[in-house]
Image (spheres, helix red, strand yellow):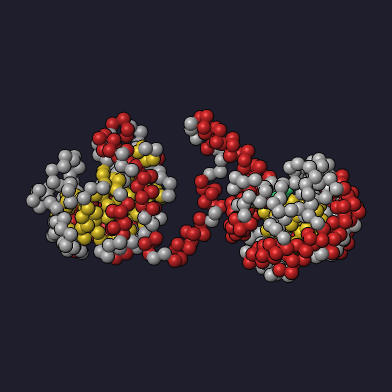
Amino acid sequence: METSSAARAASHPFFTAANAVAHPSPRTTSRFSALRQQMLSPALCLLMEAHSGISAKIVEEAGFGGIWASGLSISASLGLRDSNEASWTQVLDVLEYMSDATTLPILVDGDTGYGNFNNVRRLVKKLCERQIAGVCIEDKLFPKTNSFIGEAQPLADVDEFCGRIKAGKDSQLDDDFTLVARVEALISGRGMEEALRRAEAYHAAGADAILIHSKQNTANEIFEFMERWGNRAPVVIVPTMYYATPTELFRQAGISTVIWANHLMRASIASMRETARRIHDDQSLVEVEGRVASVKDIFRLVGNQELEDAERRYLPDKAKARAVVLAAASGDLGELTRDKPKCMIDIRGETLLQRLVGVLNGSGVREVAVVRGDRKDAVFAKGATMVDNDRFAETGEVYSLAQARATLEGETVLAYGDVLFRSFILESLMGSSADIVLAVDARSHSGAEKPRVRDLVSADHAYSGDYLDDAHAHLFRMDAALSPNQTTGEWMGLARFSALGAQWLREELDVLEAEGGLETADMPALFTRLAAKHPVRVKYFSGHWMDVDTLTDVADARNFT
Ligand code: SPV
Ligand code: MG
């Protein structure tokens, strides 16, 4: 990196815009050469501070070409002082998250190198292994103190520090790794002559660039240094204290790289403090909701979409299962259903329907179609698409199901919109080898006082409760009119069809339609018809579900976590 910036500017064929910024390198370039190219470019290289995986992503998203992994900010993010309280391997762990989170080159603040030449050797090797493009080491003593604390901090012996630089350069695993030597002479009050003497020594020892640090509130001593340095090597600055100096003047002075050193950490402290205070004082989230990043934004930043794509590629078919939720009927729960259907009543801050969709999604069912009818504009759920049965008033639930015919392809779950069940019940159906399987409560017929008894089940095998009884039960009939001694349970309003089962279901809907019975058929009639032609497995459970038919059910549902 031995080029004067004036010469760099003059000789660079692409250097035309007055406010040019070094561009991120194409992805084919290694991160080592990307940083080196940016620092050598006649355009000004701007490095933005980050201290974590997420802040690194935010830097990349903002359009920066490189990251400054600040020692101050990384320590602060761990709740520690900038005094080498975090061990160097703990810093390395943070860097690994940052490096994984972005494609940008990272220049890490290596403090003093964490010891003598030997510590620098190991540090540089480990940084290269993690694709960290460069390190900056400062001519102070371990353990370091932040440059803005106190006066006249002791400096390292020049020859000893040159040894650290040589050891670092000799240990790099990539020719394009960048080692920046940071001169603290101005900060510690040793004057310009000492700063220049040290810069020259560090340059001669092999440093790729010199960081000249200043804590004055103007850039005068930086510009004086630039004049006298004469561009013997690229110069890096950190204008935290002389922040008001126009960036254009840094360009004109021939500075290679500007580090915006700690502003994401400071921004997050201000924002977190304001948010925490507001929630504490209000005991509510209402005021902050619009001011904080959305949960969706978090998902986007951390790349949830990529995981969904990968799941489609790598997970077995289970992840591709779809569901149809029948929620067209109104249901009467008095005041609670005055302006919305039953599936939209609130159960502890979430609608009944949303809870159901959540359980389905949680079991790998990603595509959920909700058939709505009554007051359809009031029916919605995150993560579900809506299908309309506009003839809900004169048709039954099988007609509603037929409106979602397009969803009945491949493995399909079918659920009533007013049921709650524990996820293990759904998972047990999903794990079944049967082509059609119904979740049936073996208790419900036995005297429980329930208004809805329509979905009574008669199977060839009753639930025995016997551990050794593993015989499969199959449906004969589903009907409200079954007598107690015919009844073996109650359907919970939850069924699963394999791809073949879904095909049988579509065929049966077609037959019903051809016979003119589609409009009026109910689910018990449909299952009874299916059971006459195909095996319809009955899987017994005992409780752990509920349907919401009465106000007492609503109260119970609120305790059903
Ligand atoms: C850091 O960001 O940790 C730095 C820059 O070293 S400064 O805090 O200005 O010293
Ligand atoms: Mg630092």
Residue 320's image quarter?
A: bottom left
Residue 215 horizontal side relative to residue 75, left or right: right
Residue at image coords 37%, 49%: 357
Q: How many marks?
A: 0
* Location of residue 472 in the rendering, given as x and y in whole percent from the top left corner: 18, 62
Residue at image coords 75%, 46%: 147
Is residue 170 among what the camera can see? yes
Residue at image coords 20%, 55%: 540
Residue 435 horizontal side relative to residue 456, left or right: right
Residue 467's image quarter?
A: bottom left
Q: Nearer the viewer, residue 334 or 199?
A: 199
Residue at image coords 30%, 61%: 431
Q: Nearer the viewer, residue 309 or 512?
A: 309
* Location of residue 251 in the rendering, given as x and y in whole percent from the top left corner: 83, 52
Query: Which quadrant is the N terminus positioned in?
Result: bottom right
* Location of residue 108 in the rendering, given as x and y in whole percent from the top left corner: 69, 57
* Location of residue 91 in the rendering, given as x and y in whole percent from the top left corner: 62, 55
Is residue 13 among what the camera can see? no
Query: In the displayed structure, would residue 190 be above or below residue 25?
Result: above
Query: In the displayed structure, would residue 103 be above or below residue 336?
Result: below
Residue 209 horizontal side relative to residue 513, left or right: right
Q: Nearer the viewer, residue 182 or 550?
A: 182
Q: Nearer the viewer, residue 313 or 212?
A: 212
Query: Which quadrant is the C terminus positioned in?
Result: top left
